[in-house]
Amino acid sequence: RRTVSRELGFSPGQIFAQLGKAPVASASVAQVHVGHLASHGGPPQTCSWVAANAAAAAQNKTPAAAGPIPAVGPAEAPIPAGETRAVLKLQHEGVDRLMGADIVSALRIARLMRWLDPKYAAFHTILAAWESEMAHELDFTREAANLVTVKSNLAAARLPAAVPLPLLASRRALVMTYEEGFKITDTRALAIHGVDTSALMARVVAIYAQCIFVDGFFNADPHAGNLLVRVSPDGEALPVLLDFGMTVTLSTKQRLGYARLVLAALDLDVAALQAAVRSLGVVNSQSDDLPERDLAFWRFFMRDTAPRDQARAEAQSFFKDKAAERAADSAAGRASRHVVQIPPDLIFFFRVVGLLRGLCASLHASVPLLQLMGAHAKIALAAAVPQHLHAQDFAPPAPERDEPRAAAATPATSHTPAA
């Protein structure tokens, strides 16, 4: 109660008519409580804001936004009429000091390892990237802004997904809308609802591909606990995205670099892949001499997903080939392949793809991962081309002729401009 009052300026009783004392979830940074919003007497961003939007939804009118958090979508009621459930996320006391001390100790160890052997430089890069994003995770006002951004981006892309809407936020407390759903790894619930797991994961892949390649803004801490599934009465499975405390914002160069990387791997284009990894700042000891090994790695990393047993067999075969390559390098007196330089954002790209692969394996979902990611990479690259350079005609120009052709008996069919 003291924390809520101190952080948000209102007592729990002013914000919630009822609030569960026991947390429904608790992790290293915070714990989550579920309750019902008060109908009156509290801050406008909760009770009266909800009442205004519920009334607008009932009358099919544009919802009125109040307070610092705007409604997303001019004709969308973020909270359905009659829905009063909301979530309170509270940061654990002293967790900022503990996490800060832990990361400082880890960075000291990483710096020592890098000094002893430069091959461990990438390990230091990973921890340094984690340190910068960890500070953001401890500020819930940033998470509130991130939720609004992601919700708006997915709505603009017309990708079906549910994202909580923040109502009140401070550095250590966050009140947001409650999103119904069960864990995406709950295979029993998926089976009861008859969810096609391959179709569900294809939708999840499309969401992450949109966030990375088109929006350049994605979750830096993706794991199965941040993904739920909501099944509508008509049987549609909707992904529910939670916890955007840690996010990565890519520059245009980085975003298009990842798009070109994916497209080059899809097209088996060694030269284009070399250019893409260089633009991203990825360097390994054999990229210049044996670029085809880079292509083999990226195609393996983003290959079609498969059930766990098949995925394990594919990994064993790949690493067997890598062992043979190392033996051949040794016999030829060639230095072994190792990472020389890796950009911090690549760590989080690896995490996203790893999450998607792991979920697909757990759910026995077969998804053309590289193809789906490539589709959104093409959208990103096409959008980067100036409008005046876009193709204006579906058909190629007519070939030039040495002599004028005699007039045809029937009029020639003209080219149809693209819509």
Image (cartoon, grey):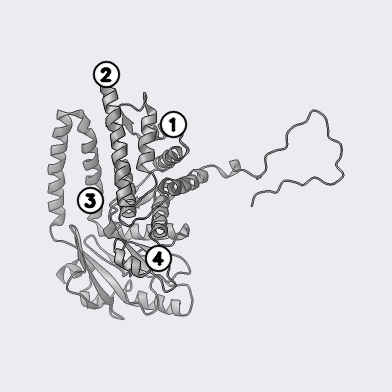
Give the number of the disc on residue 135.
Answer: 3
Residue pushed farthest top?
A: 333
Q: Earlier in the sequence, mark 1 or mark 4?
A: 4
Q: Position of residue 358 (x, y in %)?
A: 30, 51
Q: Look at label 1 and name its amino acid.
A: Val
Q: Which residue matches tag 1?
A: 270
Q: Of the residues shown, which amino acid type is indicated by label 2?
A: Gly
* Front residue (pair 284, 362): 362
Secondary structure of residue under mark 1: helix
Using the image, tell me which numbered label, if any, was put on residue 333: 2
Q: CA distance from mark 1 to mark 4?
A: 38 Å
Residue 74 location (% of width, % of height): 47, 67
Looking at the picture, tell me which residue is in the foreground, 305 or 46.
305
Asked if residue 341 shows in the view, the reply is: no
- Determine whether label 1 and label 2 are within 8 Å by CB: no
- At 46% from the left and 33% from the top, the residue drawn is 269
Q: Amino acid at mark 4?
A: Ala
Gap in angstroms between the C-alphas marked 1 and 2: 25 Å
For image coordinates 82% across by 29% down, the residue present is: 403
